[in-house]
Amino acid sequence: MYFSVPALNIPWLSYSGTRVTSLMEQRAIENFLIFYPSQAWVDIDDVNPNLLKAIISMEDGKFFTHKGIDWKELKTSLRLNKRRGRAVRGGSTISMQLSKNLFLSTNKSLVRKAKEFLITFRMEKELSKKSILEQYVNIVEWGDGVFGIKKAASKYFNKSPNELSSSESSRLAAVIPSPLRHDPSLNSRYVNRRSSIIRARLNNVELFPDKKK
């Protein structure tokens, strides 16, 4: 099996600034848009730590210790999904999600997943965890035409990213798996249940532990 990996310009990821991702391009095509969704970049130091903890606790609990792929979680997810006969649990790390959103389509195939792995390995090798997390919160989808935490915080809670409460942060993290189906500001059972789980985990998440050694 032969396939090509997109030509990557990884170093520019370490610089702050808006960018058009593959997912944004795909959404623009799906919605027959002439322009890509607008973005607003925010430095990770200007994001409430509770939001970062909320994302890590729900999306990638081993973010600071793995090398891009959490093999144990991936195997667990594959076994569970096979047993249930449908996708009930995702095994993608934050780095894998970032690789897919930046460079690849949402089409599910073994070739696309292989490309995602290769991009993730390179990204983890060349970028710091802080840089990866900053890219993630600035490009992740939080609703129809809503990309990045600055846009999401403003749209749903009329706040800046550093003003978000722990409850608001947890609700935003809760909808990341299905941002087009769920609104973090609404009183839905799905969001309430997931955000409650996230809030209970916040105190167990340590941000950038290597810098404290």
Image (cartoon, grey):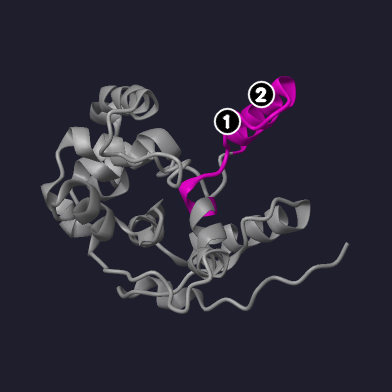
Q: Determine which quarter of the picture holds residue 35.
A: bottom left
Q: Residue at x 76, y 57 (%)?
A: 111
Residue lying furthest front: 32
**The label number, if any, that marks residue 80 in the structure image:** 2
Vertical order, 135 against 61 (above or below): below
Q: Would you say 167 lies left or right of 97 here?
A: left
Q: Would you say 197 lies left or right of 155 here?
A: right
Q: Secondary structure at mark 2?
A: helix
**The label number, if any, that marks residue 112 in the structure image:** none
Going from N to C along the chain, the mark reached first, 1 or 2, is 2
Q: Position of residue 56 (x, y in %)?
A: 37, 40
Q: Which residues are magenta?
A: 71-96
Q: Amino acid type of disc 2?
A: Leu
Query: Quick check: can you spot residue 194?
Result: yes
Q: Position of residue 51 (x, y in %)?
A: 25, 43
Q: Amino acid type of disc 1?
A: Arg
Residue carrying label 1: 89
Whole-number angstrom distance, CA of label 1 to CA of label 2? 7 Å
Vertical order, 145 against 93 (above or below): below
